[in-house]
Image (cartoon, rainbow, N blue to C red):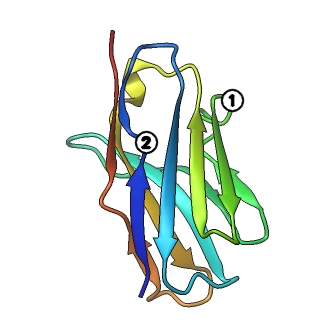
Amino acid sequence: QVQLVESGGGLVQPGGSLRLSCQASGNIDSTYAMAWYRQTPGKRRELVAAMSFQGNTNYDDDLRPRFTISRDNAKNTVDLQMHNLKPEDTAVYYCNAFSLTREEDDYWGQGTQVTVAS
């Protein structure tokens, strides 16, 4: 079993930066990718960025210039650095850890609210 705890959300002004962190506990082996998603009310949860254990990344193309995912396999953490935030980035951001070989191993954090407003 894997548990994920996000931190770092909050209120930030447009143009500001924020760093989200996700701490995973449990058996995160080399088959696990870790990712950040976000969701706004009435919309589907959307992928922001993902990173495999080996460091391969996948980004939402529109967010790639401003968002950077990083991962520390030794600490079982995944971070999301966000720059030049815009009001449309306001959402609940979720951490996800999933095995690329075992479909049943798919875990989510509780989410952290990011609000971009002046």
Residue 8, disc: 2
Q: Amino acid at mark 1?
A: Pro
Q: Amino acid at mark 2?
A: Gly
Q: Kindly identify which numbered label has been placed on residue 15.
A: none
Residue drawn at x 60%, y 70% is 76
Q: CA distance from mark 2 to mark 1?
A: 20 Å
Give coordinates of residue 114: x percent, y percent. 36, 35
Label 1, residues with CA under 10 Å away: few <14, some 14-19, many ≥20? few
Residue at 77% x, 61% y is: 56
Q: Is residue 65 above or below residue 100?
A: above
Report the residue at 38% width, 68% height from top: 108
In the image, farthest residue toward the front = 75
- Residue under label 1: 65
- In-image side of 17 versus 1 (left or right): right
Residue 1 image offset from top left, x and y in percent: 41, 88
Q: Secondary structure at mark 1?
A: loop
- Which one is closest to the eye, mark 2 or mark 1? 2
Q: Within 10 angstroms of label 2, few (less than 14), some, or many (20 or more) residues?
A: some
Q: Secondary structure at mark 2?
A: loop
- Earlier sequence position, callout 2 versus callout 1: 2
Q: How far from the left and from the top, in percent, is residue 69? A: 65, 48
Asked which quadrant contains residue 74, the reply is bottom right
